[in-house]
Image (tube, rainbow, N blue to C red):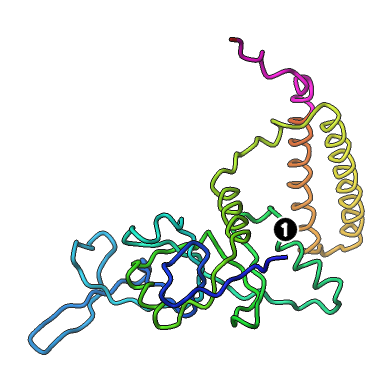
Amino acid sequence: MAGFYIRPAPTAPITQGDIFHGVPIIGVSLAKLNQIVQDGTGIKAASVQPDAITDGMILLEKVRITNAIVISQSCDTERVPHLMLAPLSPFTLTEKTAERKWKKINHAATSLGEPKSVYLPGNPTLNVARCIADFGLAFTLPREFLEELAQRGKRVAGLSEKAIGFLQFRLAVLLTRLAQDDLGWPSKEDLDIKIDGLTEQIAAQEKSKGLKAAELARHPQGNPEIVADLAEADVLIEHLKGAKKQAEEHRASADELGGEPPTG
């Protein structure tokens, strides 16, 4: 089976899936902005408000160094002035058993529950450690700057053809998600289960509330923690009752057809 990575030649064009070590993220922190100004004694930093930033102003900012993967399309990487990258963060295993470690790795690599996070396996030959690519923190760098880094040996790996397809699929999952209303997809049978489940939760909370109320009655001076727990239980019970009522109201029309198919 073909491997996940390839070793790009130093002079090869940058393509989607190229992995770089030690690239800078240069961003503007709105919490504390400083501009570089010149006076009679030289240059100094002076604070500036976000709404006072002007074109051409030179700002003083910290640079963060990260490993990153190119996510711009390969057809763009040879012509557009800026390329998009996703930062890579270490994927750590703190589980004590091999079974749990494998479950964590397998879930990270195959689950679509976190579309912004993509697992990349390690490869000791290329000095690539297990890591997570975070599409949600994507940033850009000038293409010419990345080309210079590649020539200086900062591009450590690329993705194989199959792995690029996987990366593109994960990008598609992130960018084409269609939100569904919580009550827009279940059938009547599904909602029956949901209603029964909410009924069980409400009963469990009512029972727990009764036990805590009885415990509070045994404290003549009161107990602030129990009082807070009872108030929290009331809020949760009302939320569960509201969700149950919504499900019951929606159940009547849950199995209706969504319209007639187009003709012609």
Q: Is residue 134 above or below residue 128?
A: above
The residue tagged with tag 1: helix, strand or loop? helix
Numbered disc total: 1
Residue 5 horizontal/vertical position (percent): 61, 70
Q: Name above or below for residue 70 compared with residue 43.
A: above
Seen in the picture, residue 105 relative to 243 is either above or below; the reply is below
Q: Position of residue 209 (x, y in %)?
A: 86, 51
Mark 1 Cα-neighbour bin, 10 Å: few <14, some 14–19, many ≥20: few
Image-based side of 29 in relation to 91, left or right: left
Secondary structure mainly formed by the magenta segment:
loop
Quadrant in the picture for the C terminus: top right
151 left or right of 223 in image: left
Which one is nearer the viewer's eye here, 122 or 108?
122
Q: Residue at x 49, y 60 (%)?
A: 71
- Residue ID at (43%, 61%): 84
Judge by depth and name the residue closer to the eye, 151 or 100: 151
Q: Is residue 225 above or below residue 42?
A: above
Q: Residue furthest bottom?
A: 41
Q: Residue at x 51, y 75 (%)?
A: 67
Q: Classify the position of the N terminus by image quarter.
A: bottom right
Q: Amino acid at mark 1?
A: Thr
**Is 18 positioned to the left or the right of 128 in the image?**
left
Residue 141 placement: quadrant: bottom left
Magenta range: 248-263
Judge whether residue 47 is colored magenta. Answer: no
Q: Is residue 258 magenta?
A: yes
The residue under label 1 is: 110
Residue 56 spot, x, y in % from top left: 18, 66
Q: Quadrant of residue 80?
A: bottom left
Please name the residue shown 87% across and 63% down the image. Answer: 219
| Percent of width and height locating residue 43 | 16, 84
